[in-house]
Amino acid sequence: MDNDLLKDVEKAAEIIAAGGVVAFPTETYYGLAVDPFNETALAKLCRLKKRQQSKPILTLIADQHDLQLLVAHVPDTLRPFMALWPAPLTLVFPGHHTLPLQLTGGSATIGVRISSHPVAMALIRACGFPVTATSANISGATPCRTAALVKEQFGDALDFILDGGATPGGSASTVIGLRGDKPFIIREGAVPPDVLQDLL
């Protein structure tokens, strides 16, 4: 990663820590990062996306140690899926009781993944805490693969766009949740179902 991009990562982290909204690249599309513990930032994120606050917002973590900041406990049946991280695989855990309602959408659960994109990982590490990663698009619009497309959709409404080049696009992250204690696919996505079949 070159020095200019590293400086932009640091700038983005400072903006997020101050309550701002930053677009950044992930292993699927560009996402929107805010501090997931900042209710004002979460409300701003929902306004910008024109997103219902009843919809939960997924998060990215730097490593599995960070789960303790977000989840009430890690069910044993989700642990085999965690071995696939980093990957475009979001796992839905019981949420910590202190999480903002805007983050969980009132569901008492939290979607988490570890990204395989180097810029996304650098950003989370620079922040020193998890960040949100809902797709960088107006709700219902096409997800954005480039910084230019993010700018086209949001204009100057975002606090910063971290340009890490084009993202792969394709399917969004696969989402796995629990029904009782049994894992199931909530949303098919970038991880092929046959990769998950033995774990379900």
Image (cartoon, rainbow, N blue to C red):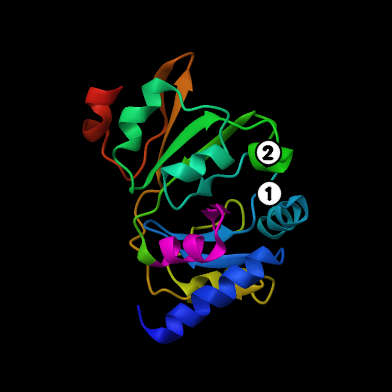
Q: Residue 90 is drawn in which quadrant?
A: top left
Q: What number is the disc on residue 27?
A: none
Q: Residue at x 72, y 52 (%)?
A: 38
**Whole-number angstrom distance, CA of label 1 to CA of label 2:** 7 Å
Few, some or many residues within 10 Å of mark 1 (<14, 14–19, 20+): many
**Residue 3, placed above or below residue 67:** below
Q: Which residues are magenta?
A: 119-136
Of the two numbered discs 1 and 2 on the same chain, state the one appearing first in sequence: 1
Q: Percent from the top left, x then y, of residue 131?
A: 56, 54
Residue 152 in sight here: no
Q: Residue at x 60, y 31 (%)?
A: 95
In the picture provided, is 160 more to the left or to the right than 198?
right
> In this orientation, which residue lies closer to the viewer: 158 or 119?
119
Type of residue at label 1? Phe
Q: Secondary structure at mark 1?
A: loop
Q: Residue at x 49, y 32 (%)?
A: 92
Q: Are marks 1 and 2 in contact (CB under 8 Å)?
A: yes
Magenta run includes residue 130: yes
Q: Which residue is mark 1?
A: 37
Magenta run includes residue 20: no
Q: Which residue is mark 2?
A: 99
Few, some or many residues within 10 Å of mark 2 (<14, 14–19, 20+): many
Type of residue at label 2? Leu
**Residue 185, placed above or below residue 131:** above
Of the 4 image quadrants, the one containing the N terminus is bottom left
Q: Residue at x 45, y 23 (%)?
A: 75
Q: Percent from the top left, x then y, of residue 36?
A: 64, 50
